[in-house]
Image: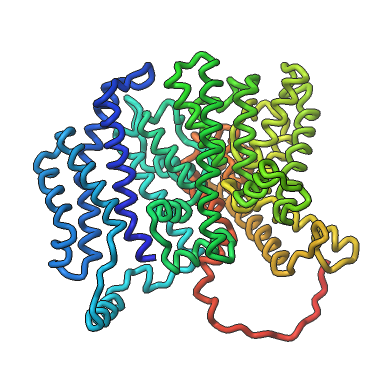
Amino acid sequence: MTRLYQNIPLLLELFLNGLFIMVYSFYSTTTIETSWISAVVVETVLEVFAGMAPFVVLVSVISFFIKSHTVEEFIRKYIFSLICIVPMFFTWGDIQFTFWLAAVHLFSSVLSVYEAPTVYTEKEEREESNEQTLNLGVLEKIKLAPAQIVILSFSAIIGVGTLFLLLPISAASGKNITLVDAFFTATSATCVTGLTTLSIADNFSFIGQVFILILIQIGGLGYMTLYSSMTILLGKSLAVRDQVLMQDLLDISSLEDLLQMIINIIKYTLVIELIGAAILTFAFNSQGYEFGEALYYGIFHSVSAFCNAGFALFNNSLENFQLNPAIHFTISLLIFLGGLGFIVIKELEYVLLKGGKLINLSVHSKIVLTTSLSLVFMVAIYIFFSEFLHGLNDLSVWEKLQVSLFQSLTTRTAGFNTISLEALHPHTIYLFTLIMFIGASPGSTGGGIKTTTFAILFQSVKATLKGRDKVEFFDRKVPNIVVVRAVAIIVISLIIVSFFILLMMRLEPDKDFLKVFFEVVSAFATVGLSLGITPLLSSGGKLALILVMFIGRVGPLTLALALGQKNQDKGNVDYPEGRIMIG
């Protein structure tokens, strides 16, 4: 883990200074100006990045110093960084000079990743080993478990995201982003929820929206996945502890499968989001938006949909495009794929592109696909008939089918909407809370208790009613420990949701119960749909929802494991069975 966090300065430099270098390169060779982003805005952005660049390099220099064993080693290895950083501070604010120095230093930092390890004598190796033992990082000393690392990583991302959204350049002209609203938005984006206390289109500038998009992408895939991907792309190998952590997070047994899965995650994410962005760009362009604006909308909504985030750049979500099949069908497909999980996508690729057979899919994939498709179509049918003469009354039969199918898909995981939720029957809203609670599938970008958990509970009840003591799927038996874990997830989730509904009723006594109930479930399942009360919440209500979103994203079982990690080594006693009457 020490090695993991030592690479954060490099990732920070790659992102911030790399973005500065890219924007300045485009700006110096062509004019970046459209109806939705002026040259003045670009110049302001460049000034901000140029001001931040020396401090980003300073963070790298400090990191180099910490990693060095002696001052002499630091000067010998990283003298070039010192040569770069001194003139950067002396000429602070000079965009062109900062650009060249930042570009050269970034190139040097990337090359340093590939440097050969230092060869020590036997005596030096012993001294180095003793020194490393004495200077273990805080994270190594407390021996964080995988569940605790997940929580710490998401917390750090949310904290950094909040700071970025508080920057003046993140707010739209004449707007002010408060700390609570920035914290709420950063949490919602990182937890891929989609609930917002402020209008993304009206209150955040182009830069602020880009920051939100980056948080969505990081939150959707997870920091550890992105870190591992960057490590592999740079040609480095993962540390043993990082390998164990990733194998635990992705539920993979071998190192070969782990590396292949990380590569697949990169591939599927880039390919699916790029294809979705291309289709959406032309769809928005056909709606009358300029190509540059349509391209931006296409990229933003493609990433938001695949990550099941539900953030939209329109104040009424996608209601303006409810009758545009190119937009809502593309969004629907992105949501569905993002909610399946990368393991299922990999197997589907084999079936669809390499001539495999559906019968050869793993039990996990069969359960995910069967449960997901069943929920989508059953809920769509319910919406169609229950709202036929109510919320969908003004639409044709074909249009009602489109809206019903889209809303069925997005309600379970994503949070977009093409119809006003407040126009629907209360019983339809209640159904939405049930399917939101179920959510997406394991290993996906969505939340909820997960489709497999729901399927195991359903089969467990079915087995009990038939007098069986085994839970089976597709001629395969589910291990008892998995059944117990599924029940634990559901019980913990119900307790958490019930507690926060009670807390929100106490904090927001003037709000309607159904709206509060819907809001809490939406936050817990990281869906992001709302009945309109999110901007009206008090600071206490917003903070409560922030905590719900965070718990929902990391997972109730992960949170329970993280909190109970201290007691895992206190012994393993096998007690005799005791008979208890139930029911």
Query: Where is residue 98, by image quadrant?
Result: top left
Looking at the picture, tell me which residue is in the foreground, 530 or 481. Answer: 481
Quarter holding the C terminus is bottom right
Residue 434 makes an appearance in the image: no
Q: Say which residue appears at 26% left-offset and 31% top-offset.
A: 24
Q: How many marks?
A: 0
Residue located farthest toward the top when viewing the structure as drawn: 288
Q: Position of residue 471 (x, y in %)?
A: 80, 63
Left or right relative to 295: residue 346: right
Against 77, residue 417 (above or below) is above
Residue 232 at what x, y percent from top left? 43, 55
Between residue 463 and residue 197, name the one nearer to us.
Answer: 463
Residue at 55% x, 32% y: name it: 275
Question: Could you tell whether 421 is left or right of 227 in the image?
Answer: right
Q: Is residue 288 above or below residue 212?
A: above
Q: How is the image coloured?
A: rainbow
Residue farthest to the right, as pictured: 466
| Residue 260 location, quadrant | bottom right
Please name whichever residue, 91 or 189, is drawn nearer the observer in this view of the structure: 91
Where does the image place residue 66, in percent across and percent down from the top left? 23, 64
